[in-house]
Amino acid sequence: MQFIDTHSHLIPHFDDGSPDWETSLEMMRQGQEDGIVEAVCTPHILSKLDYDREAELYRLFEELRHRAKKAGIAVKLHLAAELYLQPDLNLDCRMATFADNGRYFLVEFPMNLIPDFVSQRFFDLVMANRIPVIAHPERNGKILRDPEKAYEFVERGGLLQVNSGSLNGVFGRMPKILAMQLIDANLVTMVATDAHDLRSRPFKLSQAYETVMNEWGAKKAQKLFYDNPRKIILGEDIQAEEPKPWGNFDGKLSLKDRFKLIVDKVRM
């Protein structure tokens, strides 16, 4: 199986991802061996100071592509950014959207809350055909406490990206359970590595792919790990699955019972 990764921190000397060129290349070799054929580099953009470093970021990105080609690594690279959510979110710079397609952008919430301005801001952006892809909602404290918030964002036109590490149990039991809940409810558009290093947060997708394939089948796994990521990069329409009502599973199971089914599948 081939994978496309839409969230990674492969570029060194910019954020808390890869610390140096050697690590970046080794991470890319790791991903290539795992089946990753394309990847989007998404360094953290936390403030205006980071936006002002756009020229530097493109220089580092091109150097990474050059070094990877020279090393014989065939993973195709694209550039975007993981934008920290702020009221003055800037989507006009080249790095803001996936492969500069002007449409899809990756956004990160504060880890323990969702600011009050988010719903209206996202609504305005979606109406302008600028679609937020919410990074790792399963790790957000507010969504962990109230998973229905994730359903509300999808209902308003947003997309969700779950981390492979969450499905692998790297971040603990509850993020894994919530990640599986979100996939089960048809709320997740793609699974990505959010790779930062070689060991604790590696550039690998195959283990998470196996989990999804075993639980929901090859068709869903193909969508989450290749088809939808490809469309995101190209700026194409995503044919989203109909979300299952969060509080009622096919009119038979309550949220509590459905949650128990997911919990029973998770073995930490």
Image: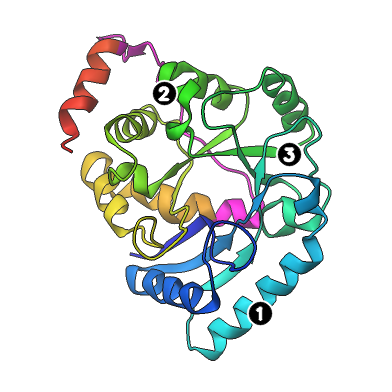
Q: Disc 2, disc 3: CB below 8 Å? A: no
Identify which residue, 46 or 65, lies in the foreground. 46
The quarter in which the N terminus is drawn is: bottom left
Residue 130 - label: 3
How would you classify the magenta stretch by its main secondary structure? loop
Say which amino acid is labelled 1: Glu
**What residue is at 40 percent from the left and 21 percent from the top?**
244
Identify the magenta region.
230-255
Residue 63 - label: 1
User: First in sequence: mark 2 or mark 3?
Assistant: 3
Mark 3 Cα shell of 10 Å, populated few (<14), some (14-19), many (≥20): many
Residue 254 makes an appearance in the image: no
Q: Seen in the image, is 112 located left or right of residue 262?
A: right
Residue topped by disc 2: 144
Mark 1 Cα shell of 10 Å, populated few (<14), some (14-19), many (≥20): some
Q: Seen in the image, is 170 located left or right of residue 57?
A: left
Q: Is residue 62 magenta?
A: no
Q: Position of residue 12 (x, y in %)?
A: 58, 68
Identify which residue, 61 or 129, lies in the foreground. 61
Q: Is residue 231 magenta?
A: yes
Q: Position of residue 208 (x, y in %)?
A: 31, 50
Q: Seen in the image, is 109 located left or right of residue 255?
A: right
